[in-house]
Image (spheres, helix red, strand yellow):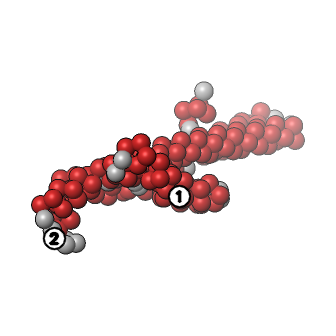
């Protein structure tokens, strides 16, 4: 549960930063480009177009590094390493080589957003799959704890043949233990049924 909370917090912060960056890149490209030099009007026209196209999927750029760190944090460093290589190595380089054959010089401009989108989609797929696995393991852990409590209760019942009053106290303790076990659990709805 803590891992999912941190993941959601990181995604929220990442999306805020990425969306602000996207808006700046789309609405203020000339101002940003002019920070790095000046040139003719043709220079600015090409640079603005290139800037807008190449950085179009900036708003999803946060997904790949966050997903990479997520896998490292949950002990699956291999997936984290693969995800960290997806945008730059696995997607961008081949697209920079292939797309110009199809689209001419514009292919280089479109390679960046295609790589960003592909890396984001792969990250979403792998993270959603892993979060579902973690949820399943969490539910299995709850079920194990419940089975353990039930076995403890059955053993208490067999060992305690002193009378009804003593058994009533065992039922209360068991009920208290179950409430404590299930209190503040994320999957209470699934376990309630």
> In this view of the protein, which residue sits in the foreground, 129 or 82?
82
Task: Tell me what residue is drawn at x 65 percent, y 58 percent.
Answer: 78
- Whole-percent x, y for residue 4 in the image: 52, 50
Residue 14, disc: none
- Whole-percent x, y for residue 192 in the image: 59, 31
Residue 42 left/right relative to 136: left
**Residue 183 is drawn in which quadrant?**
top right
Q: Residues within 10 Å of mark 2 (few under 14, many from 20)?
A: few
* Residue 5 in view of the camera: no
Circle 1 residue: 89
Circle 2 residue: 38
**Residue 154 is drawn in which quadrant?**
top right
Task: Tell me what residue is drawn at x 23 percent, y 52 percent.
Answer: 49
> SS of the residue at dot 1?
helix
For the image, the number of numbered tags is 2
Asked if marks 2 and 1 touch (Cβ < 8 Å), the reply is no
Q: Is residue 40 above or below residue 108?
A: below
């Amino acid at each position: 549960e803590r891992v999912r909370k941190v993941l959601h917090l990181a995604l929220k912060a990442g999306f805020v930063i990425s969306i602000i960056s996207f808006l700046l890149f789309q609405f203020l490209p000339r101002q940003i480009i002019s920070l790095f030099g000046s040139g003719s009007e043709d220079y600015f026209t090409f640079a603005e177009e290139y800037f807008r196209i190449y950085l179009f999927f900036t708003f999803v750029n946060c997904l790949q590094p966050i997903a990479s760190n997520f896998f490292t944090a949950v002990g699956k460093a291999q997936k984290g390493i693969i995800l960290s290589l997806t945008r730059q190595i696995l997607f961008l380089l081949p697209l920079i080589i292939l797309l110009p054959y199809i689209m001419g010089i514009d292919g280089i401009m479109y390679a960046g957003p295609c790589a960003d989108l592909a890396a984001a989609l792969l990250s979403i797929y792998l993270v959603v799959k892993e979060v579902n696995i973690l949820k399943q393991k969490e539910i299995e852990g709850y079920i194990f704890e419940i089975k353990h409590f039930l076995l403890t209760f059955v053993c208490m019942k067999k060992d305690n043949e002193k009378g009804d009053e003593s058994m009533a106290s065992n039922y209360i303790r068991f009920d208290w233990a179950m409430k404590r076990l299930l209190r503040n659990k994320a999957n209470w709805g699934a376990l309630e049924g």
